[in-house]
Amino acid sequence: MQPDHQQTEDKRKELGRSDEPVEDELVEEFENTVMEGADRLNRTWRALIITGLFGGIDVGLGIMAMLAVKDATGSDLLAGMAFGIGLFALRLAHSELFTEDFLVPINAVVAKHGTWLQLCRLWAVTLLANLAGGWLFMWVVAAAFPRFEQLLVETSLGYLEGGLTLETAALAVLAGSTITLSTRMSQGTTNDVVTAIISLISGLLVVGLGMLHGALNSIVIFGAMHQGAAIPYTDWFVWFLWVIPLNMAGGLVIITMPRLVRTLELIRKERARQDEKIAAQGLQS
């Protein structure tokens, strides 16, 4: 009589394309995320900085669309959907927003295709480059559209005035989890139309519902500063210091950790393969 685990593997082969203990779609997604994550982790400094800069610019494009729609309609939900244009641009241009790095590269690190030091470098450079790219792009937007001054100031003060409360903390956690979840959903499709829909929904939720996202909201605040708003950089920085960790908690705890647990068997197998490869290279040398 066959052992239970052998029967399970045989059943998987019969029902799916592989004998892995998870769905075939998850196997394919895991392999794709590990490959993409390893690519992100091993980028050169130049590629990393430029990718992050364009991430900030793409977000600025979405903010420009958001301002135009909010100015014309007064609707937060429609403005949020318009911001989805920026998220769609991020996908098509292969640039990066800070919170998109919470799932894909971590898969690569735990599968031994990268190191935690590389992950910290990716996070730090992407976040700083997002802010720099957004700051520069919003200077141009502020100069081109002075009529958005009041809207930018009102929106920015809405982000900053609440301070750290249970409500604002929850909004920051939800922003991190929502963007990370939209990244995971985008990994599951190669259809640009589906990707566009995911981006619009994400914009609707994050911007339309007034969630707090450290990088995204900071770029809006920079636009208000460029318009002459009396917002000191110290006030922004204090706000930024508590929003970013909560964004990370939302993306890492709510989305990334359960995904890692779900694919634990795949992670173990990939780690074992990498250990064998390293051992073989050591023998050859």
Image (cartoon, rainbow, N blue to C red):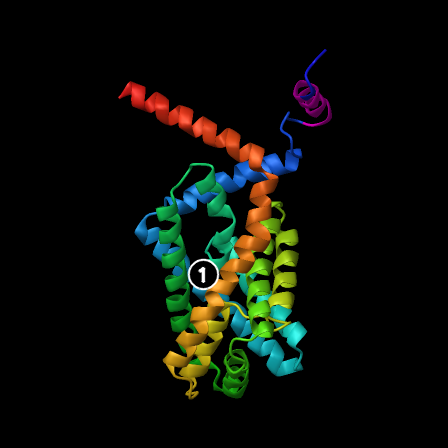
| 61 or 35, nearer to the observer | 35
Residue 86 location, x and y as percent?
54, 64
Question: Horizontally, is 87 left or right of 44 in the view?
Answer: right
Q: Work out which quarter of the rendered image holds the N terminus and state it.
A: top right
Q: Is residue 97 visible?
A: no
Residue at x 59%, y 36% (from the top left corner) = 28
User: Identity of the amino acid at label 1?
Assistant: Gly
| 244 or 44, nearer to the observer | 244
Residue 51 location, x and y as percent?
40, 56
Q: Badge 1 is on which residue?
A: 55
Seen as rendered, the residue at the extreme top is 1
| 150 or 26, nearer to the observer | 26
Residue at x 30%, y 19% (from the top left corner) = 283
Q: Is residue 181 visible?
A: yes
Residue at x 42%, y 43% (from the top left corner) = 39
Residue 250 location, x and y as percent?
56, 59
Q: Name the element at disc 1.
A: helix
User: Is most of the magenta stretch helix, strand or loop?
Assistant: helix
Magenta span contains residue 171: no
In magenta, the rendered stretch is 5-16
Q: Work out which quarter of the rendered image holds the C terminus and state it.
A: top left
